[in-house]
């Protein structure tokens, strides 16, 4: 198994690293560790998500300044 620190440094796309997907405030509050013994599947899924969905969204709308999503009422 690769060290967690080494996995976190893995670049998944032009803008995202694996570490961007490792921490979850909700998971931490519930006591869940976001760590797998075999990271190959989440690395591949994260790379595809970042490359196919997130990078194009950032290209279109820019990077969010906050890690939180907020609802806006009109």
Image: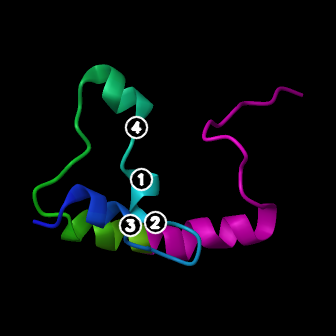
Q: Quadrant of residue 32?
A: top left
Residue at 51% across, 76% down: 13
Would you say the residues marked 3 and 2 are in contact, meaning their CB atoms lie under 8 Å apart? yes
- C-beta proximity under 8 Å, tags 4 and 3: no
Of tags 4 and 3, which is closer to the observer?
3
Nearer the viewer's eye, disc 1 or disc 2?
Answer: 2
Element carrying mark 1: helix
Left or right: residue 11 versus residue 36 is right
- Distance of mark 4 from mark 3, alpha carbons? 17 Å
How far is the residue under mark 1 from the one under mark 4? 8 Å
* Label at residue 9: 3
Residue at (40, 28) in percent of width and height: 26
Is the residue marked by circle 2 packed among few (<14), some (14-19), or many (20+) residues within 10 Å?
A: some
Q: Residue at x 10, y 65 (%)?
A: 1
Residue 18 position (above or below residue 66): below
* Pointer 2 residue: 17
Residue 48 percent coordinates (x, y): 43, 74
Boundaries of the magenta span = 48-74
Residue 22: x percent and y percent? 36, 49
Q: Earlier in the sequence, mark 4 or mark 3?
A: 3
Residue 72, quarter of picture: top right
Q: Nearer the viewer, residue 53 or 59?
A: 59
Say above or below: 41 vs 30: below
Q: Which residue is mark 1?
A: 21
Q: Residue at x 70, y 65 (%)?
A: 58
Residue 72 magenta: yes
Mark 3: secondary structure: loop
Which residue in the protein does label 4 denote?
Answer: 24
Q: Earlier in the sequence, mark 3 or mark 2?
A: 3
Foreground mark, 3 or 2, reads 3
| Cα gap from disc 1 to disc 2, whole angstroms | 8 Å
């Amino acid at each position: 198994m690769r060290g967690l620190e080494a996995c976190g440094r893995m670049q998944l796309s032009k803008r995202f690293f694996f570490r961007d997907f490792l921490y979850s405030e909700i998971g931490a509050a519930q006591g869940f560790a976001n760590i797998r013994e075999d990271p190959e599947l989440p690395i591949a899924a994260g790379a595809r998500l970042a490359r196919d969905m997130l990078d194009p969204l950032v290209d279109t709308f820019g990077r969010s300044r906050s890690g939180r999503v907020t609802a806006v009422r009109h």
